[in-house]
Image: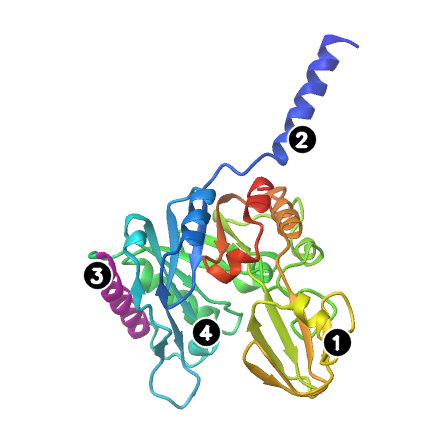
Amino acid sequence: MRLSHILLYSLALVSLLSCGSRHDGQVNFYHWKAKAEMSPAKADALRQAGGNTLYLRYFDVDQSDPKAWDAYPEYVLRKVDKAYKGMNVVPVVYITNRTLKNCDDTEYLAKKIGRLTNQISQRHFGKAPQRLQIDCDWTQSTREAYFKLLKELKRHYSLEATIRLHQIKYKDRTGIPPVDRGTLMLYNMGDLSDMNKNSIIGTDIVKDYINTNTDYPISLDLALPLFAQTVVKSPKGRIKLIRGTDGDNLSKAEATFERLGDNLFRIKRDTLYKGFYLTENYRLKMEQSPADVVAEAYRTVRTSQIQIKDIILYHLDEETLASTDLKKLLKQL
């Protein structure tokens, strides 16, 4: 083989390998509870991940009654362990889409969000934040109000916004949010009512939205799931979510739970499940975030044209960490 051919082959091999190379950005965490407490399990997870940024949910904004005169904060952050105070904390505010539909004054809403965000930061960290992430699954109908809100907030913060898969594929319709940075949420992508598929994450769904030619005009962090949940479906088709799964114990209680599939059960008689009273013929779907599936979805995004900076794992929670092989996942990123 000629030297020139060997050189070309070597360069092609290096290029191929680099596409699947290890992530070189930070691996950080979301914290999504009203009390940010520390524990040995959380400290170990932070040590393994190695990042120094914590995306800390400060509060939600919702307006459930369209006739109400104002939107209200919910699930406001109440407690922060001193162990987090040495970290780079990014406040996260979740805004429901219906709040935007009912919003007539985005400037007023932005002021309220900024005021409460600053108050929480001053109380727990002794300073106002420089960065802020807004989490909202906006649509075409709420795009105008949402983008106005973001522009107001951007006057005061280095602003970030969460992005869903449909907002990547259909960016011409949904628009590009006026922010400094985005976070692609790679979870909660499926149909909760489909009792045969995992709604948390699925590589087939990711590949429907992202391919090697997919791009996005702003750089993104990538949010990956660690959590598990139980989807409860009533005989009338109503859906409820319960944190965590308990499939192993359900398999042993054959008098109460009938296994219909690998992760699907039917309730045969009235019972309690994780503190919830459920009656006959309710169905339970156990959903998890397997490391191999999460890693494959991550690689699909990495091989696209999207500029990925850091990874954010959802989320820093003892129950979640206890059911997660974090070390296995980190090795594949």
Q: Secondary structure at mark 2?
A: helix
Q: Label 1 vs label 4: CA separation?
A: 40 Å
Q: Label 1 vs label 2: CA separation?
A: 50 Å
Q: Nearer the viewer, residue 277 or 231?
A: 277
Residue 96's tag is 4
Residue type pointed to by label 2: Leu
Q: Label 2 vs label 4: CA separation?
A: 42 Å
Q: Are marks 4 and 3 in contact (CB under 8 Å)?
A: no
Quadrant holding the N terminus: top right
Q: Nearer the viewer, residue 127 or 47?
A: 47
| Mark 3, residue position | 122
Is residue 116 a member of the stretch shown in magenta? Answer: yes
Q: Which numbered disc flags the more N-terminal residue, 3 or 2?
A: 2
Magenta stretch in the rendered image: 107-125
Q: Which numbered disc flags the more N-terminal residue, 1 or 3?
A: 3
Residue type pointed to by label 1: Glu
Q: Secondary structure at mark 3?
A: helix
* Residue 206 falls in image quadrant: bottom right
Q: Nearer the viewer, mark 3 or mark 2?
A: 3
Q: Which numbered disc flags the more N-terminal residue, 1 or 4?
A: 4
Image x and y of residue 318, in percent = 47, 59
Q: Are marks 1 and 4 in contact (CB under 8 Å)?
A: no
| Mark 1, residue position | 254
